[in-house]
Image (tube, coloured by chain):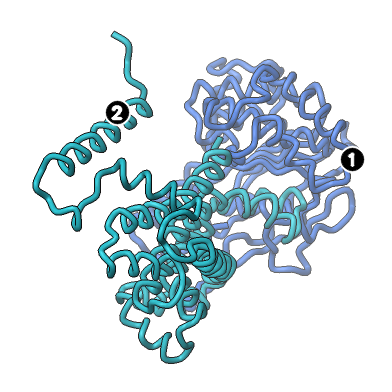
Chain colours: A cyan, B blue
Amino acid sequence: MSRLSPAVARTIIIVCVLIVCEIVTDYSSASRIIVAPPSEIFWQVLKIVTATSNVPHFYPNAWITIQEVLGAFAVTAIVGIGLGFAFASSKLIGDAFEPILLVLYAIPMVILFPLFVLILGIGMAPKIVFGITVGIFVVVFNTSAAVRQIDPNFTRLARSLGYGRVMTFFKVILPATAPTILAGLRLGFGYTVIGVMAAELLVVTKGLGSLIDWASFNYFTPQLYALIIITLMIGVTGNSFFSVLERRWVK
Amino acid sequence: MCQDMVVVETTSICKSFFDAATGRETVTLENVSISAAENDFLVLIGPSGSGKSTFLNIIAGLIPHNGAPGQVSVHGQPVFAPNPKLMAYMFQDPVLLPWRTVIKNIEFGLEAQPISKEERQERALKYLDMVGLRDFADFYPRQISGGMAQRVALCRALALETDIILMDEPFGALDEQSRIVLGDELVEIWRKVRRTIVFVTHSLTEAVYLAESIAVFTARPGKIKAEIKVDLPRPRKIGSPDFNTMVDTLWEYLKEESITALNREKTGEDRVALPKE
């Protein structure tokens, strides 16, 4: 008997779930306001991305969300990696400031959001800042853990071979920490998307979050599902991008 | 023979560590003066904590000693920092970079110096041939055994083509059989390429098996207790009467020191936390 590949098994499961959903929504008494059949959701996705649905200003709103996510993630990555290296390379800095970060990490960030709105208004700024505060911790912690886990023999070896600080950083420290840092960035991207979307749903002005809110408010259920799926694609795309990078590295 | 050129020379090296936690200063090396001639195979042996590895690190320029009047000189030049043009250093662990293939790991040793890509590769292959690992050039460290990894580390040290190779218990993490085989290979290579080797070990057999001369360290603070010439013919035979006599002689020197070191550990008296270096 031939063995199923994981990809095939996964596809079968997904197709089965979709079929079941389709049948349940078509033949049960479940209200069309609560559920939509997958075929119609798929149809809506097509209509939305071709701008032929009743969803208003899809591309301008999506572009705003993408800008927020990319902006927040750029800061998360650069500042997060920088802080991670700072914490790991100086015992004083690490011991002094890491506990603060751990405490901040433990509180639910969403309670800070009203504060951000108060200070930064209701434009893109509070959403970006919120995305950063949700996403940055895992990047910082992964980076500092990666640096601390480097075998001290690696740096001793480099020293014995005449490597200076800069060369050691690029030839030893960076490649040694890259897999863990990439894993941190992958998780950090996911959290950043969560942060930005949560912010968009809390302060409804522009962005995919506002469209989701619009669809939900008007009981456009298929559109709601379709918009959720489109939003998910942003997270999935980022995640796969980093997975590919990681795999290439580990190879 | 008696006027061999001195390649490595240390004069009255002292080293003490300051332990900030207890506020005590521990002397690990006291007035160590040793020299190794050209093509020498000098083995440093001593009880644990005698500072023989520290001493090797000081020769390598990896850690500083207490300074004047002590001095380390190599080819007559004082040593202050690692110099990969003069000395290769080999660790107890292979210390191979897991993201580089075997050959790239050997080339890593040369990348800090202005050596062309072609020459790096040429040298790496030359020494891989010497240890019989050419077929494994494109393997990653996780795909090869511990003994092979240590051979690759040896290649990396040899590829620097320095006159001097410093080895800190390089086969210490291997099983006894691999140790003997690798020791044989090392002697074979040493006779072929004629380098000066300074080799730290705590194994009596390994010392007698490999050395041209042996320096015996005392228990802490490390001093030189004896310097012994080993003039057994090569290839040496473990367990031959001459070999055993030599091991006995060495043990006579070491016994008392080992007991001192062990008793110290047992009583916990004078316990110190030495920095890991």
Is the N terminus of chain B in the top left, top right, bottom left or bottom right quadrant?
top right
Q: How far is the residue under mark 1 from the one under mark 2? A: 77 Å
Please give the residue where the numbered disc 1 appears in the rendered image: B5
Tag 1 and tag 2 share a subunit:
no
Image location (x, y in percent) of residue A111: 31, 81
Q: Where B74 falls versus B1 (above or below)?
A: below
Label 2 amino acid?
Ile
As rendered, which of B27 and B82 lies closer to the eye? B82
Image location (x, y in percent) of residue B211: 68, 31
User: Which element carries disc 1, helix, strand or loop?
Assistant: loop
Q: Marks 1 and 2: CB-CB under 8 Å? A: no
Q: Disc 1 or disc 2, which is closer to the eye?
A: 2
As rendered, which of A74 and A114 lies closer to the eye? A114
Image location (x, y in percent) of residue B222: 59, 56
Is residue A18 found left or right of B103 in the rendered image? left
Is residue A213 found left or right of A22 in the rendered image? right
